[in-house]
């Protein structure tokens, strides 16, 4: 026994300097899984109902910083998506891989000038909406099924790779973010520069953000996809109410023109004791001037916090395509014009 204790003491003595050098490293993560059941009234699909377990952006990460002196710090973060269900995204199996994609990861510098980094990160346009997002931009019940997307098939609820971002310091609640990225895709493998910017105010219970994103369209040469978003929220005690409005423009191949669409969302949230109630109503407008090509969605959420890190939650959603479209879904393929989809779920999340 004495020999074992001496061996442990020696190993600890040698390891101590290494641990001291890495004392700024933080390990963190989140596991968020729910069971859910969905059905659609569409008669043009082979699968009209589905019951499954769903992963809601569960993640594992390590991050840290190093003091370089004079108020300058080196910062870094490595974060990967983990799928405890083994189902993969939208039920497409990930082959039982331990990690299912890169999430927010970066290396950069932070100082009095702000923060600058390179890596793979959520766009400022996406982040501007986070204040009023009830489902962490993930899963079947999130407003991201409508808000941030349009009938032209484009989504701005994105994390951009190959990106350089700059964040200003926060001054009296005011701050800004800028992201630039070089992206190569499309049949012609065209490389283009995309940018996303936002400015926000967050103080005294008031949140306001204006964001814009520009993407040269690689499908229709010479056209650009773009999105503008305005988000506002007011917090009073345990209650929050928020409103989002956005305008999305997308190149249309058939006409070599740009089609636009207006979306909006009303969000509410209220905390009482260990419980939180939340709800949103989202509506996507007509695309490219074609009548009845939008959609409507409502979701309700209840969460009970056993602790600061563990929450049991339940949700219900109803998504209805307008009569001239079948572009939108939560889980099930709409199949027919004007299809309605509804579902409910029960989940458990733990943050560490």
Image (cartoon, rainbow, N blue to C red):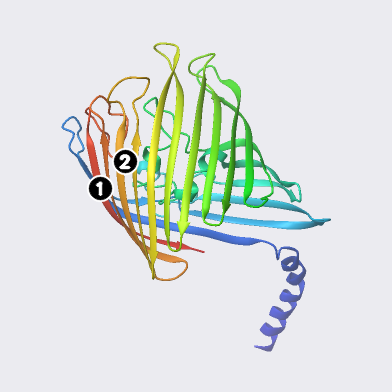
Name above or below for residue 262 compared with residue 53. above
Q: Residue at x 48, y 15 (%)?
A: 220
Between 150 and 185, the one nearer to me in the picture:
150
Percent x, y of residue 90: 36, 42
Name above or below for residue 137 compared with residue 13. above
Query: Which element type, helix, strand or loop, lies under badge 1?
Result: strand
The reply to whether residue 86 is in sight is: no
Query: Which element type, helix, strand or loop, lies under badge 2?
Result: loop
**Residue situated furthest right in the rendering:** 70
Q: Which residue is mark 2?
A: 330
Q: Is residue 274 left or right of residue 129?
A: left
Q: Is residue 328 left or right of residue 4?
A: left
Between 29 and 269, the one nearer to me in the picture:
269
Q: Which residue is mark 1?
A: 343
Residue 242's label in the rendered image is: none
The reply to whether residue 287 is in sight is: yes
- Quarter of the image with the N terminus is bottom right
């Amino acid at each position: 026994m004495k020999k074992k204790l001496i061996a442990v003491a020696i190993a600890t003595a040698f390891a101590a300097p290494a641990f001291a050098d890495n004392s700024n490293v933080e390990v963190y993560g989140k596991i968020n899984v729910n069971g859910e059941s969905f059905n659609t009234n569409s008669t043009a699909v082979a699968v009209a109902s589905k019951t499954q377990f769903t992963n809601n952006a569960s993640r594992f990460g390590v991050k840290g910083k190093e003091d370089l002196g004079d108020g300058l710090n080196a910062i870094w973060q490595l974060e990967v998506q983990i799928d405890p269900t083994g189902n993969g995204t939208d039920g497409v199996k990930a082959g039982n891989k331990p990690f299912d994609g890169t999430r927010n990861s970066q290396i950069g510098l932070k100082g009095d000038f702000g923060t600058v980094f390179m890596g793979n990160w959520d766009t400022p346009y996406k982040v501007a909406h986070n204040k009023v997002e009830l489902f962490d931009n993930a899963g079947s019940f999130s407003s991201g099924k409508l808000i941030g997307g349009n009938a032209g098939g484009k989504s701005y609820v994105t994390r951009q790779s190959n990106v350089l971002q700059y964040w200003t310091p926060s001054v009296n609640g005011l701050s800004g973010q800028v992201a630039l990225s070089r992206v190569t895709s499309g049949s012609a493998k065209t490389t283009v520069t995309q940018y996303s910017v936002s400015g926000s105010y967050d103080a005294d219970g008031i949140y306001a953000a204006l964001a814009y994103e520009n993407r040269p369209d690689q499908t229709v040469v010479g056209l650009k996809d773009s999105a503008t978003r305005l988000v506002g929220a007011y917090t009073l005690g345990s209650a929050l109410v928020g409103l989002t409005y956005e305008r999305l423009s997308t190149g249309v191949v058939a006409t070599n023109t740009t089609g636009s669409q207006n979306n909006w969302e009303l969000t509410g949230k209220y905390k009482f004791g260990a419980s939180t109630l939340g709800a949103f109503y989202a509506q996507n407008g007509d695309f490219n001037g074609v009548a009845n090509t939008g959609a409507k969605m409502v979701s309700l959420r209840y969460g009970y916090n056993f602790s600061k890190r563990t929450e049991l939650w339940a949700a219900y959603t109803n998504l209805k395509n307008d009569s001239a479209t079948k572009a939108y879904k939560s889980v099930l393929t709409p199949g027919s014009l004007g299809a309605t989809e509804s579902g409910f779920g029960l989940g458990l999340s733990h943050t560490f």
